[in-house]
Amino acid sequence: MITAKSDEGIAFWETYRPLDQSEDALWRQRFYEARHLGAIRLERYRLGNNEGVRNTYEAMAVVLTAAA
């Protein structure tokens, strides 16, 4: 989420440290993104948001394609 907001992200990374771009770090990032999308899918299903559930399949495909 921190990468989504550029102004807050810049301040965060200047204070914290640069984002690790190693192969292992990128794999972990995609793993956690997929896990988050799974949680979103379950919540949308619970709320009866069928269109939102369908959208998570497209988002998950993007994450899984990047992992390949």
Image (cartoon, grey):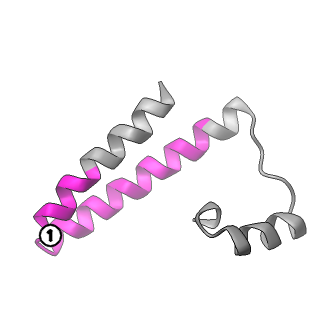
Q: Is residue 52 left or right of residue 15?
A: left
Does 25 sit left or right of 39 as displayed? right
The kind of secondary structure element at disc 1 is: loop
Residue at which label 1 appears:
49
Spot occupied by residue 54 in the image (x, y as percentages of width and height): 18, 53
Quarter residue 36 falls in: bottom left
- The majority secondary structure of the magenta stretch comes to helix
Q: Residue extending furthest front?
A: 7
In percent of width and height, residue 25 lies at 69, 40
Residue at 75% in and 39% down: 21
Residue 7 location (% of width, % of height): 72, 73
Q: Is residue 58 left or right of residue 17?
A: left
Q: How many marks?
A: 1
Q: Position of residue 58 (x, y in %)?
A: 28, 45
x 24%, y 55%: residue = 55
| Crowding near the residue tagged with mark 1, few <14, some 14–19, many ≥20 C-alpha atoms within 10 Å | few
In the rendered image, the vertical position of residue 48 relative to residue 60, given as above or below = below
Residue positioned 59% across, 46% down in the render: 29
The three-letter amino acid code for the residue at tag 1 is Asn
Q: Is residue 31 above or below residue 22?
A: below
Write the start and end of the magenta stretch as one range.
27-56
Q: Residue furthest top?
A: 68
